[in-house]
Amino acid sequence: MDYLPLFHNLKGRNILVIGGGEIALRKVRLVQEASAIITIVAKDFCPDLLEMNARDKEHGCNGLNLITASYEHQHMLDLPNIVMVIAATNDRDLNRLVSEHAQNANILSNVVDDPKFSTVIFPSIVDRSPIQIAISSGGDAPVLVRLLRTRFEALLPAGMSKLGSLAGSFRERVKAKFSNGADRKAFWEEVFYGPIAEQAYANNLDEAERLLAHKLESTDEFKTGEVYLVGGGPGDPDLLTFKALRLMQQADIVLYDRLVSPEVLNLVRRDATRIYVGKTAGDHPVTQDNINQKLVDYALEGNRVVRLKGGDPFIFGRGGEEIETLAEHGIPFQVVPGITAASGCASYAGIPLTHRDHAQSVRFIAGHLRSGKMDLNWPELVQPNQTLVFYMGLNGMETICEQLKQHGLDAQTPAALIEKGTTDRQQVFIGDLNSLPEIVRSAGAKAPTLIIVGHVVSLHDKLAWFNVTETTQ
Ligand code: SAH
């Protein structure tokens, strides 16, 4: 190991920075966040640095101590109890000289972009204080470090800070209650991997604190579970939200339906119990009441239950009904939005749903047949400059196209049907109100499919980018 990562407490300690440019500014910002007292020696200071200093003083914070001069050894000797020197000028030799002076005095020294002459180097930081991750390649692969940092940034919920602080405020009490280290560990694991953490991430801090206090005081083993109604998006697993993925990976039980793609389902925690509650048109093996009841029962047994749905749970997803039942039983729940089929399919087919020249509004419509009929407000749908998106419209496609024409939409209005949008099986069929039904039937398209009607469809020719070789026209 070339470097030992340590976390420094710099509160109220003196730091000397040599150089007043952009590079110095970046380091100054960092050490300032750690509440160090900063003196900067430079021939001149960049405007951003001066501005930051002025702003800090205005807000009553300690400003920077700026010395306009060429660096001399005396500057270091004059400052009492320096803990670190940062050499950040664009003069390599000067930087090295500064570092030599610091090292001779046993002061930590950092030379920007010159690790060989530094005794300490700055890591890349993912900051969710009090939780922090420091990443370093020892100067060998800074771009790789940056990529890794992006990954960690994505992995750590923004609310991790709050959870960390909450844990800090309970630390002594938990220690007092569990003298045995293993019990303490088990307690914290349950806190960090369940409803308490989720409440903190959702910014419900009072509730998180209440649950944590309750957990600490209660003597019984009784746990209430929680239900997460999660939107799994239209198919491509890359379209999941961070929150959806996190909850899927800590679920005990997952109830999913037909629209959840195998690729998305694959991301569920390996040892979670998976229960299929899908419905296919005309065949309802699991009734909605039955699903609602299952969610209640599993949660009351203390499970973390994920109800995984295709697209967005609140768009033609009956999500509202499911959480109504949970609310009636006082079971905590959260709803995680997903990318709805209209957004997903439109993007992946290169069909913008709105466009300055073609459509100023868009409608999401349930296009299924009920007893062979479709009871929709057709005159409203044929208004100019709007895009129509029909969900569940494959069986009723002829009716949709026919009714739109009968109510005044031009027969040449472009129309598209997207099959299994956003997956690698995606197919896009393009036609108009006259031709689309025949194109789709002869190709034998299968559900799930989405129909888009409107002039925006004509943009597909130019804007298609995904699976383009598969496109049938
Ligand atoms: N809650 C879902 C919609 C459920 S209704 C959402 O927000 O997307 C089911 C309908 O969604 C299907 O009949 C189909 O019209 C549409 N759909 C869902 N996923 C789709 C996909 N990958 N490709 C095309 N249509 C899809």
Image: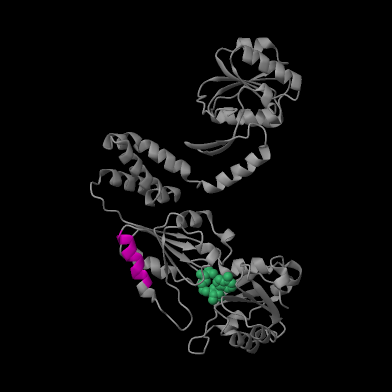
Judge whether 143 appears above or below 359 on screen: above
Q: What residue do we see at 58% from left, 84% from top? A: 378
Judge whether 82 appears above or below 337 on screen: above
Judge from the rendering whether residue 434 lies leftward or rightward of residue 126; answer left or right. Answer: right
Residue, far left: 219
Tell me where residue 186 sits by quadrant.
Answer: top left
Give x and y (percent) for residue 203: 44, 48
Judge from the rendering whether residue 412 lies leftward or rightward of residue 138; answer left or right. Answer: right
All told, the count of numbered labels is 0
Q: Which residues are magenta?
A: 291-301
Q: Is residue 297 magenta?
A: yes
Picture quarter with the N terminus: top right
Residue in front for this viewpoint, 237 or 34? 237
Give x and y (percent) for residue 366: 53, 78
Judge whether 389 appears above or below 299 on screen: below
Give x and y (percent) for residue 329: 30, 64
Residue in front for this viewpoint, 223 or 314? 223
Residue, far front: 1
Judge from the rendering whether residue 220 lies leftward or rightward of residue 405; answer left or right. Answer: left
Looking at the rendering, the quadrant in which ligand 1 lies is: bottom right
Tell me where residue 447 sits by quadrant.
Answer: bottom right
